[in-house]
Amino acid sequence: MRQGLQLPIVSSEHLQTVPPLPRIAGSAAEGIIMPFTFNPARAATEPRVQQWLQRYEAAVAAGNPSGEKPIVGYALEPLYYDLVAVLARVMSEAGVTGDTPVADAREKVRDGLTRLQNYPGIGGTISAAPRHTFTWEVVPLIVSNGEWQPIK
C-alpha cells in the first residue's frame, strides 16, 4: 500500500484466523480475496448452522482470556467439524466400535467414505468423488468495509 501497489490479492483462508486480518491490516486489507470453506451468511437462513456458530463462539470466548470473538474466525473449523462428523457417521453406520479389529474397521471406514454422498455439513455439502477425493463447497470472501463479505 505504501508503495502504491494496487493489485488484487488472493490468499489462503488461513490468514483470516486470529487475529482477524481486516482488523490488523486496516485499510490495506480492503479487496483481499480468500477462499473459505464456510459462508457465515448461512447462519441467517439455517438454524442448525446458527446453533453451531453460537456453540463455537461461546467456546472461543471461553478459551480467550479477553473474551474477544474473531470477526469471522471460521477458516477451517466448520470443515474440520464436518469431517469428524462424517467419520463418526460412517463408523456408526458400519457398526465400528472400540472392539472392531483395526483391519476390519479400516476397511469399513474406507468403504463408507467411498460411498459418501451429499452429507449436509455445517460448511456445506460433502461428497466422495472419484479417486478417493472429496468435494465440498468453497465460498470466496472479500474484505469490504473492514469485514469479510461474500463476493456478490
Image (cartoon, helix red, strand yellow):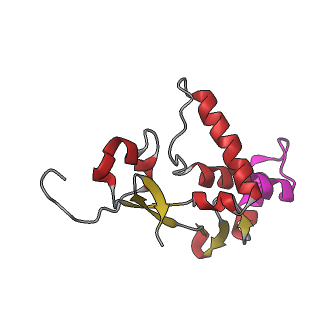
The picture places residue 99, in percent across and down from the top left corner, at 85, 42
Asked whether 113 or 47 is in front, the reply is: 47
Residue at the left extreme, as displayed: 3
The picture places residue 9, in percent across and down from the top left corner, at 30, 62
Asked whether 8 or 126 is in front, the reply is: 8
Residue 86 in view, yes or no: no
The picture places residue 39, in percent across and down from the top left corner, at 57, 61
Residue 104 in view, yes or no: yes
Q: Is residue 120 left or right of residue 132?
A: right
Residue at the top extreme, as displayed: 65
State the residue at coordinates (53%, 33%).
68
State the residue at coordinates (76%, 64%).
112
Asked whether 105 or 71 is in front, the reply is: 71
State the residue at coordinates (55%, 28%).
64
The picture places residue 131, in percent across and down from the top left corner, at 58, 73
In magenta segment, residue 5:
no
Principal secondary structure, stretch drawn in magenta? helix
For the magenta stretch, what is the residue range? Answer: 87-110
